[in-house]
Structure formats: C-alpha cells, structure tokens
Amino acid sequence: MDLIWDGLRRGIDLIVGGDPDVFEISALSLRVALTATVLACVVGVPVGFVVGTTRFWGRRAAITALNTLLAFPTVVVGVLVWGLLTRRGPFGGYGLLYTWWAIVIAEVVLAVPIAAALTAAAVQGIDPRVRRTALTLGAGRWRTHLAVAGAARFAILTAVVVSFGRVLAEVGAAMIVGGNIRHYTRTLTTAVALATSQGDFGLAMALGLILLALALTVNVLLQLFQGRGDA
Amino acid sequence: MLSAAGLRHTYGGRTVLAVDAFALERGSVTALVGPNGSGKSTILRLLAFVERPSSGTIALDGAEVHTAEQRRRARRRVTLVEQAPYLFPTSVRENVEYGLRLRGARGPAAAARAMAALERLHAGGLANRPARELSEGEIQRVALARAIALEPDVLLLDEPAGAADRAATAQVHRVLLEERARGAAVCFASHHLEDAYRWSDRLVALADGRAGSVTPENLFRTTLPEGTGSKVAEIGPLGVVVVTDRSGPVTLAIPPHEVLVSHAPLQSSARNTFTGPVVRISDHTGDMVTLTVDVGVDLAARITRSALQELGIHVGSRVVLTIKALAVQVF
C-alpha cells in the first residue's frame, strides 16, 4: 500500500510542481488526441450520417463492417500503419514513421469507425417524423439533413467525445508507430507504460492522474451540454 | 390539381395500397374514410411526395412528378399535416415560420404571416411557448397553422381533429373550408364518418388499401320526425329504431360490424330485428367476410370467416339481423 501512496504523493508533487517533462508529454498527448479526433470526426460523422439515414445497396454490410471495426485490436492497427509508413512501405517516402503525425494517422484509423458507428446509431434512433416534417414543409435535401442532425446533435456530440476518449487512452498503436521517443512522440499512455517498466512509479502515477483528469473533464463538459439540451 | 394513377405501395412484400385512380380538385374538400390500417396514412404520404410509391404515377397540374428535383418542387406546393404531428423543439412561432423561411420569407414579414396563421386557429397565444410544452390538441392546431401559413395548393391532413373536442373539430374544419375558398385542394383522412360527411364535398372510402367507388356501407338518407330520444327512421320499407335528438333530413349509418347475424330471432335488448336472404358474400382477404342481406333494403353485416362456417351460411340462406338502436349513427 505504501508504494501506491508514495507514488500518488510523488505524482501530485510532479503535477503541482509543474514538472517540464510531465507538461510536455501532456501537451503532446492533447495535441495528438485533438487532431486525430477532429480528422476522424470530419470523416466518420458524415459517413455515419449517410449510413444511418439513406438506403443503399450494401447498407447492412456497411453497418456490420463498422461495428466489427469498433473491436479492431489497436496493436493490429499499429502494425498495419507501421507497415504503410516504414521506409519499405508504400508511404515510406514521406518520412512520417516515428513522428507525432504517425500516431495521429493510427488514431484516426481507430477512431473513424467509432465516430461513424455511433453517429449512424444516433441518427437511426431519430424520430422518422423529423425528416418527414422537414420534407412536407418544403425543405430540400440539405435542410432535411440539417433538421435530422439537429435532432441528433447530442448523440452525435457523444460520438465525438467517445472518439476523443478512445484516442487519448490508446497505447498500443501509439507505441508501435510513434516509438515513444522523448520530446517527440512520447504521449501520456506510452510514457506511463515506460515509467512503470522502469520502476518510476511516481511518474507513472502522475501521468495516469492527468489522463484521468482529462477524461473526467471531457465527460463533465458532455454532461453539461446534454443537461442544457434537456432543459 | 393532384392526380394519381395505378398507385401501388408495398411494405415488406405486402401490398398496403392499391388505388387505380385518385384525384383532388382545386377548391374542393375530399374526405378519406376507412378504419385504421386501411391505407389512409400511406396514400397521404405518397401524395405528399414524402414516400415514393412502389409503382404508379402522381401528377401535379397534369405534369407527372418523378425525379428528385420534381418531387422537391412539388413539395413546395403540397403539404401534409400528420396524424401525430412533429413540432421542432423550438418555439411555436419558429415552428410556423420554418416553412416560410425555406421559401425566403424573413423577419417581420415571416413573423406576421406566422401569427396570422396561428390566429386563424385561435392559437396566437401559444406563439412564444416552447413547442414541447404543448398538449396533443395544441400540437395539432399549431401543425395545421404551420401548414396553412404556406398557403399550399394542396393541403393534406391525417386525422386533423383526432385530439380535438367537438368545438375544436368544427373550428379546424372551418379553416379547411377557408382553404378551399382560397382555391386549395384539401384532402383529410378521418375514421369519423360523421365529420367526413359533414365537412367534405366528396367522400372516398378506403378498405384494405383499396379505394371504394361506393361510399361506406349501410348509409341511408332519411328524414327523422321531431322529438328526442328513441324514434323510428324510415329506410325504404324498414322502420329502424334509432336514438337521437336530431330531426329532419339526416344520414343514418349502420356500421356493418355492429350487425349481429343469426338463424333465428334472438331474445335480446336490441330494438331492430330484420329477416331476409343472403344475396352476396364478399370475400375479404383476412379473417372477415361481409354478407349482404336483402331485408327490404340491402344491409351489410361483417362477421368472421369462422362464424360464417359455423353458421353454415351461404348465398340464399335466410338469416336474422339484429341491431341495437344505439349502434345506428345519425348525422
């Protein structure tokens, strides 16, 4: 138990003391997570919207594929992206492997299915009268989509937040394609893994606390938004 | 104004609508009557261009409407008020302004038109209320206001007075008559025969997705004597006991499912008993059959197929029809 308490105390000291390493790692993690979330949602939310609202050939297969991708092992994504970005791979010439962009790419691959599947579920759950009402009042295609998206906005926001949470907490792919290089690609999760294996339990605890705090903040913000929607 | 030909609609392989010809004329009110599940809502959604028919064509002013762009244009002239209307979770006023804004109306002009539409339904006081706080009846009135604010050429309504009391029903239908006077083609669905008769120029009956050229069965025009309570209405050679305070020219309706069929007279409280031969047995798909019995006039009785078999009834069988006086509708 002493180990936990000592680790916790040192962790708090590091955070309160403004340790530059801790600050740098947290900033990089946030940058990676926010960039990946934005890119993943720019792609995933519209895809989910189309899958959830329109009828096309192969739609059921698309939904099944999305739901399967949700359970994609992150290390497999890591290995695949590594294979694409390595010097011998098809995109090796860009020199992206072991940069923070490599982590962003892997996280986008992981988060697009989440954003898409949750958005599809969100808009599928919308009262079909929303679409019909917009149509009967003379709305064109875009206005009708807008009305449906408006009705589903909180559920779509949840899709965004869940994607962010997944990206922030991911360790396997970030380790493989980022390489956990100090000052360059060391994120909160990879740093926690390294610190623990090196026996620096205090540092691991400090970084873990920050991860928890970030996740908590995002969820509290989400709750606040949803609360306002219910009022 | 709006006409349909060869309309068929299927859900999951089942044909729910099969109407060969249907037309709505400018400056007229058409009532669609029929029981729940007869296809009223389906045909309205097809006519409103909200759903595409499985086959068949719909034409607006003679021009067939096919492509997405044609349908979008048509929806600017045709609107539908659904049975349980959806209001956007904004204010009542914003709901009514929604379609006006889509048509380019802005600011005070849109607000004035929205208010005028609400006032016509005595709903002006609701303008600033959040839509989600309204009662069912208020929602229906606001949805109707939202539709008439657009001054549509074709106004379609699914049970427009479903949640309204008698006074509100009359008010809704008076607004529909105003729309007719403006030149709109109005069509409302109702399972309430009395309202359908009273407020329409023309009645179309739907049963099992098919439009009947004949209006609902067992309808008789007659003249009732003065007085209150129980009285005898003359229908051809028959004297039918009814309970009503109405007098003068009326329409009587005897719902076929309220007619009891037996071989011998029943000892019962029912006031009307008629005897005659079965002249026709019409097969419906499903468990019900309709017997037409000549008791001096043709009366239809709807019974289950199993009852038909147990009683051993066939064309030519003499049967007794028993009808409660209270079951006879007067309007």
Image (tube, coloured by chain):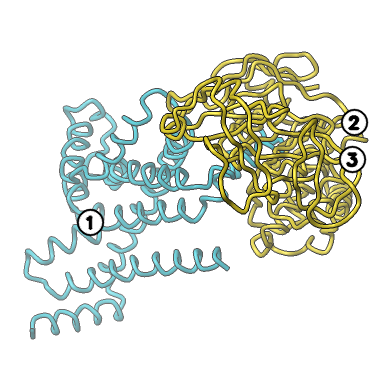
Horizontal and vertical percent for residue A112? 35, 42
Say which quarter of the image contains residue B236: top right
Name the residue tied to disc 2.
B183
- Residue located at (31% from left, 38% from top): A66
Same chain? Circles 3 and 2 = yes
Q: Say left or right for B87 vs A198.
A: right
Within 10 Å of disc 1 (Cα), the crowding (few <14, some 14-19, many 20+) is many
Name the residue tied to disc 3.
B249
Q: The cyan chain is which one?
A: A
Say which quarter of the image contains residue A129: top right
Within 10 Å of disc 2 (Cα), the crowding (few <14, some 14-19, many 20+) is some
Q: Identify the secondary structure beneath mark 1.
A: loop
Discs 1/2, front? 2
- Residue located at (63% from left, 56% from top): B89
- Mark linked to residue A186: 1
Horizontal and vertical percent for residue B162? 69, 50
